[in-house]
Image (tube, grey):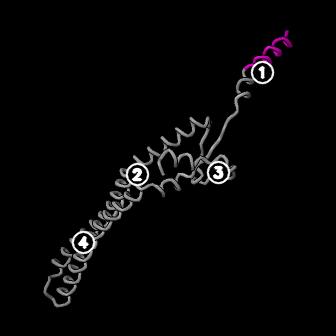
Amino acid sequence: MNQVNILWIAVAILAFASPASSQTQKFGYVNSQALLAELPEVKQADATLQALQTQLEKKGQLMVQELETKYKELQRREQSGEISPKALEEEARKLKEQEAELGKYEQDVQRQLATRRQELLQPVIDKINNAIKQVATEGSFTYIFDSSAGMLLYAEESLDILTQVKGKLGI
């Protein structure tokens, strides 16, 4: 009886395994960074980001210049004896606060740039992903890997779908 159960288990395993083994899996890969570099929308986004960065940096530079001017003026007043020790301490505290605000501004600039980059590139990334899905569906691919992610150690060039995706994107 025990042998009969083992036989049924073996038959069940073979029955479930055979459909899966008869279906071959097809793999492909694409370099998403190469696609991004060629799309005009990305070049436009980069130009927009560069303009924003320049604008924000100018404001930051003005803040730095203002802080330096105030610091030099405070030093001059201290050296000439125009300011009492208590007033000097208060002014130094204000400058420290302003310096902290400058640090916060620099962090905010980085956040703004990252957020804006994401806003500008998300539609492009969605467009690329849709083109990849179309090529994968039309080519009956089971999996598509991103070779720019550095996880693809080897692949036949015939599995590279970059050209087909470019065709879908019109580039």
Report, in whole angstroms, how far the alpha carbon at label 2 lies from the one at label 3: 24 Å
Front of the two marks 2 and 4:
2
Decide: is 133 above or below 106. above
Q: Main secondary structure of the magenta part?
A: helix
Marks 3 and 1, how far apart at CA: 32 Å
The residue pinned by badge 3 equals 152
Q: Residues within 10 Å of mark 3 (few under 14, many from 20)?
A: few
Say which residue appears at 29% left-offset and 64% top-offset. Answer: 105
Q: Looking at the image, is mark 1 or mark 4 nearer the viewer?
A: 1
> Are the residues at dot 4 and dot 3 in contact (C-beta closer than 8 Å)?
no
Q: Earlier in the sequence, mark 4 or mark 3?
A: 4
Q: Mark 1 = which residue?
A: 14
Q: Secondary structure at mark 1?
A: helix
Above or below: residue 56 compared with residue 12: below
In what element is the residue under mark 3? loop
Q: How many marks?
A: 4
Which image quadrant: the N terminus?
top right
Range of magenta residues: 1-15
Residue nearest the observer in this picture, 65 or 148: 148
Q: Is residue 79 left or right of residue 105?
A: left
* Residue 69 falls inside the magenta stretch: no
- State the mark number for residue 121: 2
Is label 3 in contact with label 1 (beta carbons under 8 Å)? no
Earlier residue among tags 2 and 3: 2
Q: Which quarter of the picture shows residue 145?
A: top right
Measured Cα–Cα span from mark 1 to mark 2: 48 Å
Q: CA distance from mark 2 to mark 4?
A: 30 Å
Which kind of residue does numbered mark 3 sit on? Answer: Leu
Disc nearest the viewer among 1 and 2: 2
Tell me which numbered mark, 2 or 4, is placed earlier along the sequence.
4
Counting from the top left corner in percent of width and height, residue 76 is at 19, 87
